[in-house]
Amino acid sequence: MKSRELQRIFWDWLSTAERLNRSLAEQQAALTLRDVARVESIQPELETMMAHMKRIDEQAVASTQSLAGELDVMPSLRSIVDALNPAEAKQLETLSKRIEIVGKNVQDRVALNRKLIENEMGYVGGTLALLAKVAQQSQGQFSTGVPSSVLVDTVA
C-alpha cells in the first residue's frame, strides 16, 4: 500500500481534530456559563492541540509531496488518487472527505467560540462604561462627591 504513511497522518489528524472539537465544546460551555477559571484552564490544551494539528498538516504536505514524487504525478490529492489502485484510491478519498467535514466542524466551533468571546467582551466593556457614567454623576445611589478615578482603588 503506497499511501499507508499519508493515511496514517490523516488518521492522526482526525483523532486530534476530534479531541480539539471536544475541548472547543467544553470551552463553549464554559463561555456560556461565564466560568472564567474553566475557560482559562482549557486554553493551554487548545493551544497545544492547535500546534499539534499544524505539525500534522506539515507532515501531510511532506508525505503528499513524497508520494507524488514516488508515483511521478503532480503533488495534489486528485493526482495521487488517480495514480493509485481503485481500492487504495477509495480509502484515501474517503479519508480526505472525512477530514474535510471534521475540519469544517472545527472551524465552525472556533468561529462560534470567538463570537461568544467577542460578545462577552462587549458586555463587560458596556458594563464598565455604565458604571463609570453612573459614578461620575453628582447625585444618585452610586455618586461620588468628588470626581475621581472609578477603576482605581483609592485606598491602595
Image (cartoon, grey):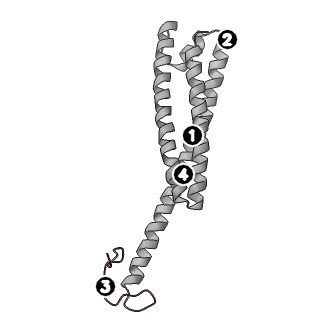
Residue 153 visible in the current orientation: yes
| Callout 2 touching callout 1 (CB < 8 Å) | no
Snapshot quadrant of residue 148:
bottom left
Q: Residue at x 50, y 7 (%)?
A: 70
Between circles 4 and 3, the one closer to the viewer is 3
What's under tag 4, amino acid-wise? Asn
Q: CA distance from mark 4 to mark 3?
A: 38 Å
Other residues around mark 3 within 10 Å, as few (<14) / some (14–19) / many (≥20): few
Residue 139 is tagged as none
Residue underneath mark 3: 147
Is residue 142 depicted above or below 81 in this figure?
below
Is residue 115 depicted above or below 105 in this figure?
below
x, y (%) of residue 26? 60, 49
Q: Residue at x 46, y 89 (%)?
A: 141
> Which numbered disc, 1 or 3, marks the residue that appears first in the sequence?
1
x, y (%) of residue 17? 58, 35
> Which numbered disc, 3 or 2, marks the residue that appears first in the sequence?
2
> Which numbered disc, 4 or 2, marks the residue that appears first in the sequence?
2
139 sits to left or right of 30:
left
Observer-nearest of 41 and 5? 41
Residue 72 visible in the current orientation: no
Residue underneath mark 2: 86
Other residues around mark 2 within 10 Å, as few (<14) / some (14–19) / many (≥20): few
**Residue numbers of the magenta segment:** 140-151
Mark 3 lies on a secondary structure that is loop
